[in-house]
Image (spheres, helix red, strand yellow):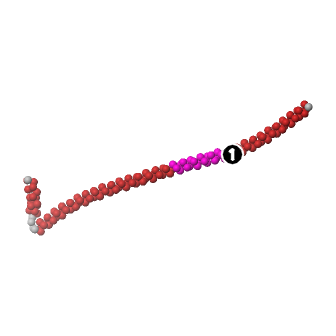
């Protein structure tokens, strides 16, 4: 009976070892599958992170472009206003210069006309000048 018990125990031990070996093979196969899935899962996570990063960068670039466009528009508007002010000032200065030139021309033409009148009347220039300066000297005395 002892031999039968030992035989049964030995048989049970072999069966258990066989079951343990099978379970170990199953565990090893699952472990291998999981080890194959880990790089794929890591790659997927990295890919997803890249996509998220690209979205964030793209949004930041779009926002920066909008800010840049707005800054350019403001700079153009400011420059246009400054240019319009400059043009107005230049026109005003041109008008002042033109007015001075016209006054100088009027004075020159007036003097030329008086000289021509003097030559036509055959009066000496000194007498014409005396007549012109007489009203000035008489107003100075008053």
On the picture, is 8 further left or further right than 121?
right
Q: Position of residue 105 (x, y in %)?
A: 21, 62
Q: Is residue 40 left or right of residue 119?
A: right
- For residue 119, above or below residue 140: below
- Residue 72 position in % (x across, y down): 43, 53
Main SS of the magenta part reads helix
In this view, which residue lies farthest toward the bottom?
A: 120
Report which residue position mark 1 lands on.
Answer: 37
Please say whether residue 126 is visible from this viewpoint. no
- Give the image location of residue 128, x and y in percent: 10, 62
Q: Which residues are magenta?
A: 37-60
Q: Nearer the viewer, residue 68 or 19?
A: 19
Of 101 and 71, which appears nearest the observer? 71
Where is residue 126, by image quadrant? bottom left
Q: Residue at x 57, y 48 (%)?
A: 52
Q: Position of residue 103 (x, y in %)?
A: 20, 60
Residue nearest the viewer, comparing 140 with 37: 37
For image coordinates 14% across by 66% down, the residue present is 116
Q: Secondary structure at mark 1?
A: helix
26 left or right of 124 in image: right
Residue at image coords 25%, 57%: 96
Total marks shown come to 1
Q: Is residue 65 visible?
A: yes
């Amino acid at each position: 009976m002892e031999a039968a018990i030992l035989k049964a125990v030995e048989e049970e031990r072999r069966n258990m070892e066989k079951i343990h070996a099978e379970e170990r093979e199953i565990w090893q196969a699952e472990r291998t599958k999981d080890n194959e899935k880990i790089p794929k899962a890591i790659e997927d996570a990295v890919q997803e992170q890249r996509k998220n990063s690209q979205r964030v960068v793209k949004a930041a670039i779009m926002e920066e472009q909008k800010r840049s466009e707005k800054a350019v528009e403001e700079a153009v508007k400011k420059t246009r206003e400054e240019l319009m002010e400059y043009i107005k000032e230049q026109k005003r200065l041109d008008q002042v210069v033109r007015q001075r030139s016209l006054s100088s021309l009027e004075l020159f033409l007036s003097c030329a006309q008086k000289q021509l009148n003097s030559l036509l009347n055959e009066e000496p220039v000194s007498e014409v000048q005396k007549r012109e300066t007489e009203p000035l000297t008489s107003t100075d005395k008053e």
